[in-house]
């Protein structure tokens, strides 16, 4: 299931950013993107010092370069330089992620299906007097922006969806309430649309609670900004989500806390960053998450998997370490709620009308 979530958001972002269509399970650009984000995650962040001792050391060394820049000159032939070799390898991967998809689009400008925004930027750079040093700078910016869309979106959005599944396994009564609301508002004859969102307050509350739960470090990675006198500022977003002065019983999964808008701070006010570092793709990410989760609630039962003896596997709220902290295991089974729900899913797939960039 995690692979399905990752593939969905990767396909969507590649379509939006590059106009690139993913048609196979072993797509080269998707594989490149996953490998790149994986290596970036291994470099760690200020909030990811967990896991085995070797991975902890790797992250600590990589982090030190941010605070002690002179370490970038540490020779790779000296003992203890594995962290620098990893950073150099990751830099090569990032460069590939910036250039390979971009060059694919650039060499295919004659094709009809291209990301309109990226195509327009490239064409503008290639016309008039842009064939100068300024063009090189423009091209660099375009590549960077397009890559950021992928790198920032795939891990975070996919992980949020996984955290939702884990929460529904641990708190099945929450899923039942969401399904009852869905049946009352939407009925069983169609799938939910974006315009239904304002009429689904409990589902919206679940999404907010998912943002602020344990795995939520996925979206609220510690944001670093440069302020006066070049001092570093780290925002402890996870601490905000655990502030008992704001969220009573903060360790429990309680969507009801968000049913009254005046009683709880909306986690979207801090999980997507702050000020000039506010994520520009926050509305896109939030919309993707709503569309996927609402369709799952409308059509699927989320059941606990069983072991070889037929006993239910009790879900554990254990998360991986790294930049995007995902559930370590998702032992579950998703089944259509009814035959009608199954037919809706198949009809949606046949008509190819899923939420997309088209």
Image (spheres, rainbow, N blue to C red):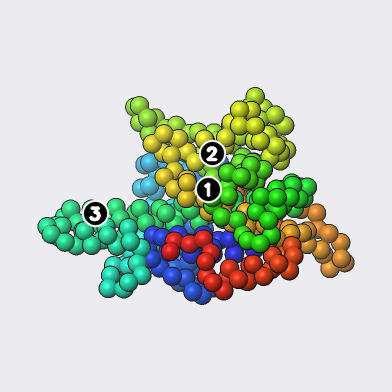
Determine the residue located farthest toward the left in the rendered image. Answer: 129
Q: Which residue is mark 1?
A: 286
**Which label's residue is closer to the chain start, 1 or 2?**
2
- Disc 1 + disc 2, Cβ < 8 Å: yes
* Mark toward the start of the polypeptide (1 vs 3): 3
User: For this view, does 174 lie left or right of residue 16?
Assistant: right
Q: Is residue 296 left or right of residue 129?
A: right
Q: Residues within 10 Å of mark 2 (few under 14, many from 20)?
A: some
Q: Which label number is shown at residue 306? A: none
Query: How far is the residue under mark 1 from the one under mark 2?
Result: 9 Å
* Residue 61 visible: no
Could you tell me residue 268's position as x and y percent? 54, 39
As helix, strand or loop, the secondary structure at mark 1 comes to: helix
Q: Nearer the viewer, mark 1 or mark 3?
A: 1
Q: Residue furthest top?
A: 245
Which residue appears at 16% of the width and 61% of the height?
127
Can you give x and y, in whole percent of width and height, for residue 187 in the image? 68, 56
User: Where does the N terminus fall, quadrant-wise?
Assistant: bottom right
Label 2 sits on residue: 268
Query: Regarding mark 2 in the picture, which secondary structure is present there?
Result: helix
Near-viewer residue (4 or 315):
4
Tell me, for residue 138, which label it has, or none. 3
Q: Mark 3 or mark 2, which is nearer the start of the sequence?
A: 3
Q: Quadrant of residue 130?
A: bottom left
Q: Which one is in front, 6 or 47?
A: 6
Instruction: Tell me which residue sits at (44%, 43%) in the image.
Output: 279
Q: Position of residue 42 (x, y in %)?
A: 52, 53
């Amino acid at each position: 299931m995690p692979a399905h979530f990752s593939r969905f958001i990767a396909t969507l972002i590649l379509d939006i950013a590059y106009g690139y269509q993913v048609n196979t399970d072993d797509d080269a650009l998707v594989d490149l993107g996953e490998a790149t984000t994986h290596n970036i995650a291994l470099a760690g962040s200020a909030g990811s010092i967990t896991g085995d001792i070797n991975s902890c050391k790797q992250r600590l060394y990589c982090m030190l370069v941010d605070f002690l820049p002179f370490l970038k000159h540490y020779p790779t032939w000296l003992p203890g330089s594995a962290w620098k070799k990893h950073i150099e390898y990751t830099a090569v991967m990032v460069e590939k992620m910036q250039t390979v998809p971009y060059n694919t689009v650039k060499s295919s400008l004659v094709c009809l299906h291209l990301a309109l925004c990226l195509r327009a930027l490239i064409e503008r750079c290639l016309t008039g007097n842009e064939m100068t040093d300024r063009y090189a700078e423009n091209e660099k910016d375009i590549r960077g922006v397009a890559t950021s869309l992928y790198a920032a979106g795939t891990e975070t959005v996919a992980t949020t969806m996984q955290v939702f599944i884990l929460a529904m396994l641990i708190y099945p009564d929450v899923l039942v309430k969401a399904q009852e609301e869905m049946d009352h508002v939407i009925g069983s004859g169609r799938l939910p649309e974006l315009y239904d969102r304002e009429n689904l307050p409990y589902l919206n509350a679940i999404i907010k609670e998912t943002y602020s739960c344990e795995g939520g470090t996925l979206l609220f990675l510690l944001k670093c900004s440069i302020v006066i006198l070049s001092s570093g500022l780290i925002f402890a977003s996870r601490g905000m989500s655990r502030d008992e002065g704001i969220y009573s019983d903060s360790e429990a999964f309680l969507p009801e806390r968000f049913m009254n808008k005046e009683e709880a701070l909306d986690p979207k006010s801090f999980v997507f960053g702050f000020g000039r570092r506010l994520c520009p793709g926050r509305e896109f990410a939030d919309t993707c998450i709503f569309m996927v989760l609402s369709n799952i609630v409308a059509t699927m039962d989320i059941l606990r998997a069983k072991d070889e003896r037929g006993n239910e596997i009790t879900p554990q709220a254990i998360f991986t370490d790294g930049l995007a902290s995902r559930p370590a295991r998702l032992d579950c089974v998703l089944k259509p709620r009814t035959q009608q729900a199954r037919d809706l899913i198949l009809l949606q797939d046949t008509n190819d009308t899923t939420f997309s960039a088209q």
